[in-house]
Every structure is written in structure tokens, then in C-alpha cells.
Image (cartoon, helix red, strand yellow):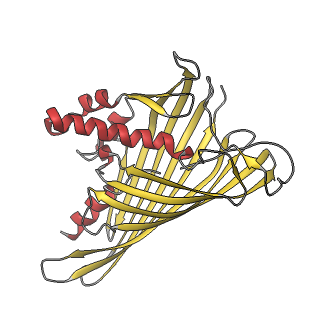
Amino acid sequence: MRRMIWLSSAFAGLAALAYLASTGMGGPASNDKFALKHAYQAGDRFALTYKIDEEKKASGKHGGDMSLNSSLLISLEVANGSETGQKLVKIQFKRILAELKAGDLQRTVDSENPKSLLPTMPLDLLTKVTFQATVNASGEIVKFEGAEGFVEKWKPDQAEGKEKQELQEAVAAGIKQLLEEPFVYLPKSDVAVGESWTLKRKVYGLPVMGSRKVHEEEVTCKLSEVRQGKGGRVAVMSIEGQATIIQGAMPGDPKTKKKAGKVEYNVDTNVLLFHHIELAGDGVISMPDGQEIQFSAQTTVETVLRREAQ
């Protein structure tokens, strides 16, 4: 019973999550404004990597510790769209790996090893489908393709009608979010060092990885400094706020999590240098014998966007 709770909660916790830009030499004056805006260029090729480490500690008669370490490697290729300023971004999952430890239980799920996969986590199929996002001149995703084809290949429990449509929308939302994450905390207008802005949004999990969770997030972002680095000016941003679960909670999931992070972006080369996010919260599960398991959960997400040679 306890192991099943750990396993379902662990794999349901895979979801992914943010990031930044500006230009010149030397330290900026305090009133200088910076346009922190990423723009895809035709011919760009990127390797997008997510590393997600989750730890849960529990107390009480049924307590125990659990860790889940996951990594996602995604390839991005950019081409011009049919309209002025429009870009087409092809998204291809290259590898997905998850390692679970709960007491003496250990389980590895690897998209490159079909024998390791769970029936509800067809990660090998995810790597065989090419997704595509159409991005307008403002950087917004106006069209997303591939989710329908993926669900057709997956055929989870022969889902049809409304259920199938909802699953397609959930898959699309989760993958679009992975694409948007490196730049989602950028300000909508030019900002000076010391200025703050607020972001409110919904955060989705990937159903294919066991998660149908939806969080509502509200964070305050701040441009802490712009410093000169070896390869250009570096914008440093801080992130602080919380996420509240509104759909798909599993037993013991914290209702709210504190969120804090730091992002560094090269203003001159439009390259994400550093992205580190931490989420922390507490939860509880009531057991049939009247006992309660108190949870302390911590998740760390690191994202790297590396430009590859054309």
C-alpha cells in the first residue's frame, strides 16, 4: 500500500518549469532600461535539457523517504513561418530518464529501454513523434501540432470523444510549457536593475509521464543585476512566489508550494546560462488505522538551453 502511494505520487510529480535577456559593455547606470526579450532566428538549433530532482521525507508509523531524479533531453529546430516575423519550432524528445528510490524499492524508467517502461508512461512513443509550435513576432505560440498524432499512437485505454480531446489538450499544454519555460519569466516591457514584475499563470504536468496536475502560480520576478561576463553582459533575475494545486492532486501532495529561483541570461548572445528553481511544501496522508503521514517535499529544477552548431 505504502509503496503504491509512493510510486504513483512520485511519477505523477514529473512536470516541468523558466527564463531571460539585454546588450553592451561595462556596468549599467542605475536608470538604464534593458529589453529582456528572446527571439528565435531561422536556422537556430538548440538542445533543451531539464533536470528535475524531487525528494519527499515522511514521518510517523508508515513514514519513509523517497527520491525521484528525472532528466529530459529535447531538440529544437527553428525555421521561418509563412508570415512576416513568424517562426516554426520543431520539438523532438531525444531521451527521457527517471530513477525512483523509495526504501528498498528502486525503479528506472528509460525511453531508450522499452522493457523498463510502465503501461501508462510510453516514453518511447514520445520520442518518435515530432511536435511543432508556430511562434508569432511577439514570441507567442499561436499554433501547436503533434499532440493529436501522439495520442493516436498511444491510445490510452482506448480513450474516445471528450476524453480523447481533453488528453490531446493536456499533452499539448505540457509540451508547450516545456518550450516556453526558458523565457516565461521575461518582463513584457523594458526594465531597470532593481525593478520587479509579477507573473500569474497555470502550470501543467505531462499526462504521458503520469501527471494530470495543474498548478496556479504567482511569482514576483526582479532584475537583480546586469554584469559583464566573459561572453557578454549577463542579466541576473530572481524569482519568488508560490504555486497552488487546483487539479489532479495525489495523496500527500502539498496544496501550496513556495517557489524561489535564479536565472542568468546572456544579453548579447541570447543564451540561457543558468536556471535554477526550487519548490518546497508540506502535505499529509490519512491512513486507514487513523495514523497520519506528514510529508515534506522539495523539488529542484535546472534548465539548460544550449545553441548547437548549424
Residue drawn at x 37%, y 41% as measured from the top left:
173
How many numbered badges does the structure rendering display?
A: 0
Q: Residue 48: x and y, percent?
A: 54, 41
Relative to 182, 279 lies left or right: left
Relative to 33, 74 lies left or right: left
Q: Residue furthest top?
A: 82
User: Which quadrant would residue 150 be assigned to in this image?
Assistant: top left
Relative to 158, 295 lies left or right: right
- Position of the N terminus, as image quadrant, is bottom left
Residue drawn at x 83%, y 55% as measured from the top left:
29
Q: Where 247 falls versus 180 (above or below)? A: below
- For residue 249, say whether it is visible: yes
Q: Residue 74: x and y, percent?
A: 49, 38
Q: Residue furthest right?
A: 26
The front one of 107 and 30 is: 30
Q: Residue 14: x and y, percent?
A: 37, 53
The front one of 39 and 174 is: 39
Relative to 61, 147 lies left or right: right
Residue drawn at x 59%, y 23% as measured from the top left:
85
User: Which quadrant would residue 238 be assigned to in this image?
Assistant: bottom right
- For residue 63, say whether it is visible: no
Q: Residue 256: x and y, percent?
A: 37, 67
- Position of the C terminus, as image quadrant, is top right
